[in-house]
Amino acid sequence: MYNCGKIAVIGGGSWATALANVVVSNTEHIGWYMRREDRIAEFKRTGHNPAYISSLQFDVNKITFSSNLDEIAENNDTLIFVTPSPYLKDHLKKLTVSIKDKFVVIAIKGIVSGEDLLCSEYFHQKLGVPYDNLAVIGGPSHAEEVAMHRLTYLTIGCKDLDKAQAFADVIKTDYIKSHVSTDIIGIEYAAVLKNVYAIAAGMCDGLKFGDNFQAILVSNAMQEMSRFLNAVSPIERDPYGSAYLGDLLVTSYSGFSRNRCFGTMIGKGHSVKSAQIEMEMVAEGYYGTKCMTEINNRLHIDMPILNAMYRVLYEQASPLKEIKHLTNLFR
């Protein structure tokens, strides 16, 4: 049975904080990389993250904090990356040590900006991490609910099921159920697309289209996601599982969803820029929309919702006109 060894969390946001709380409760000690020294100092003083989910208290004696990514990478065996996808490349530029022999767990629901690569592809192609040493976390999992210990189902995707199960056991609690899968590509793409569709769901909410149409939108989004996944990775999978449909549903409907909130503001009349400023947090779907559109420009898969979101977010198209156009395409 594989042993995850010493585990470190890389990132300082809400999801990083919620995951760190889970991991540290099941292990004796963790490493934790945060970019800002002032945040680390405040965390040590107060026992909680000063910027995100401050209700979670930590025993800081069980945490080795560092703003030096090399130090964290060298001193730990399993590295959980939980940084927003638009900033992943900048963080990794600070890394000068090899992580080829580390077990890398990706808890990022986005695509590497400027590369149009899944995070697993980026770690494999640019940093030489073997696919057997790469895992992703999927499934409906708002950080706020995990922090409140609400029942959550997570899927760990990895080509090596032994390693996937070892990590699944690390994050298993009385409120987290975890299972494993080899569909790392499908889980990652589903996590990117559900953010795009959640923006569309938010726009419909802001435009007052109603619950009946929201159901039709999400139903068609699931069909669109399935078409894409079957085209890029034609393996046997259950698209109605928690890592696919489950994640789509929670991101499209939940009040905790940043992407739905972002879309709602745009539907209510905010410009894309003003919605981003008011959010004060990253809506991954904004970046995912551009990356997925660029990828699909090569694949030519029928993806009308993705296309509509691209026109609204990047070409200043009218949200109302784009959603009305979709109403004529849906069944």
Image (cartoon, rainbow, N blue to C red):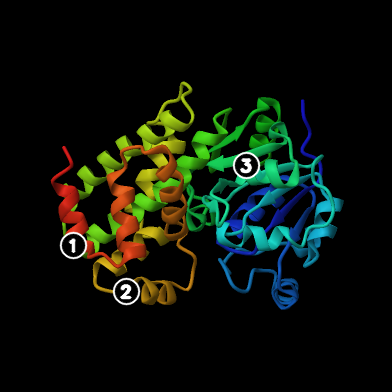
How far across and how far down the image is residue 212, in percent?
15, 47
What residue would you read off at disc 3?
121
Question: Which residue is situated farthest in the left direction here?
Answer: 328
How far across and how far down the image is residue 41, in percent?
75, 76
Q: Quadrant of the N terminus?
A: top right
Mark 3 / mark 2, whichever is N-terminal: 3
What residue would you read off at disc 1?
320
> Do the numbered discs 3 and 2 sit on residues whose CB atoms are within 8 Å?
no
* Residue 331 shows up from this direction: yes
How far across and how far down the image is residue 24, in percent?
71, 51
Question: Which residue is situated farthest in the top direction here?
Answer: 236
What residue would you read off at disc 2?
271
* Number of dots carrying numbers: 3
Q: Nearer the viewer, residue 79 or 101?
A: 101
Q: Is residue 250 left or right of residue 9?
A: left
Q: Quadrant of residue 35?
A: bottom right
Q: Secondary structure at mark 1?
A: helix
Q: Secondary structure at mark 3?
A: helix
Q: Quadrant of residue 63?
A: bottom right
Q: Amino acid at mark 3?
A: Glu
**Residue at the image point whose x is 73% and y is 72% from the top:** 40
Q: CA distance from mark 1 to mark 2?
A: 13 Å
Q: Amino acid at mark 2?
A: Ser
Q: Quadrant of the C terminus?
A: top left
Q: Is residue 71 left or right of residue 166?
A: right
Q: Amino acid at mark 1?
A: Leu
